[in-house]
Each structure stands twice: as C-alpha cells, then as structure tokens.
Amino acid sequence: MTNKDVYAVVDPADGELVKVYPTATDEAVDGALDAAARAYAQWSRQTVAQRARLLSSVATLHDERSGPLAEIIHREMGKPLDQAVAEAEFSASTYR
C-alpha cells in the first residue's frame, strides 16, 4: 500500500498517529452514492413529524456521547477539550 492509498489521522498537538484509513476505491464511492440515493428516497417519504423525531434522536445521541465525540474532535483537530465539548453540544442543539 502506498501513501496515496491511505489517509492518516495525526494528532496535531503531538504528531502522534491516531489511525490510518484506506482511501475509497471508485467502487466504494459508487456504492456509497447508491446507498445515499436509496436513503434519500426513503427519507423523502417520511412526514415532517417522523423526520423531527429522528433528528431529535440524533440530538439525544449527541448529548449522551458528547464526551467521546469531544475527545475525537480534540485528538483529530487539536482543539482544546473544553471547546471540543462545546462543539459537540452545539451539534446536538443544531439537530434539536
């Protein structure tokens, strides 16, 4: 595997390698686009109330997992942890 075949996430605070991901193949991208089209077709059939319930559930999950989400933001972006927590909380409020 060459460097162009992977994407490395590096902690900007200390240069530590967090994780390496393979880059997407053309087939994987095509599959993701097909899945998105199917999901949109299903989503567009939902009523506003159904969509609101689902988005509220996403907000609840963000609230429940704000700590781990903040840690990911902190490690990947180098953002101070208190600001990363605020970002996770803001994301929940956006969904709400």
Image (spheres, rainbow, N blue to C red):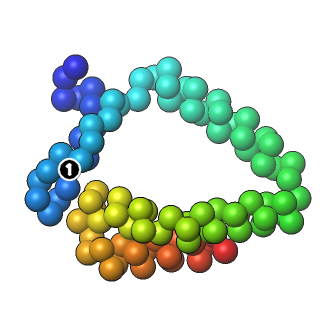
In which image quadrant can residue 59 be found? bottom right
Give the residue at x 73% y 44%: 40
- Where is the N terminus found, in terms of image quarters? top left
Question: What element does badge 1 sit on?
Answer: strand
Q: Image quadrant for the C terminus?
A: bottom right
Q: Residue at x 26, y 60 (%)?
A: 75
Residue at image location 78% in from the left, 49% down from the top: 43
Seen in the image, is 69 located left or right of residue 21? right
Q: Quadrant of residue 80?
A: bottom left
Residue 8 percent across, percent down from the top left:
24, 41
In the picture, measured across the screen, residue 7 lies left or right of residue 54, that is left
**Amino acid type at mark 1:** Val
Question: Residue 53: image x %, image y %?
Answer: 78, 64
Q: Which residue is mark 1?
A: 10
Please indicate whether residue 6 sits to the left or right of residue 88 in the image: left
Q: Residue at x 27, y 70 (%)?
A: 79
Q: Tell me: residue 22, above or below residue 95.
A: above
Horizontal relation, residue 18 to residue 47: left or right:
left
Q: Residue furthest left?
A: 14
**Relative to 69, residue 6 above or below:** above
Q: Is 71 rendered above or below residue 37?
A: below
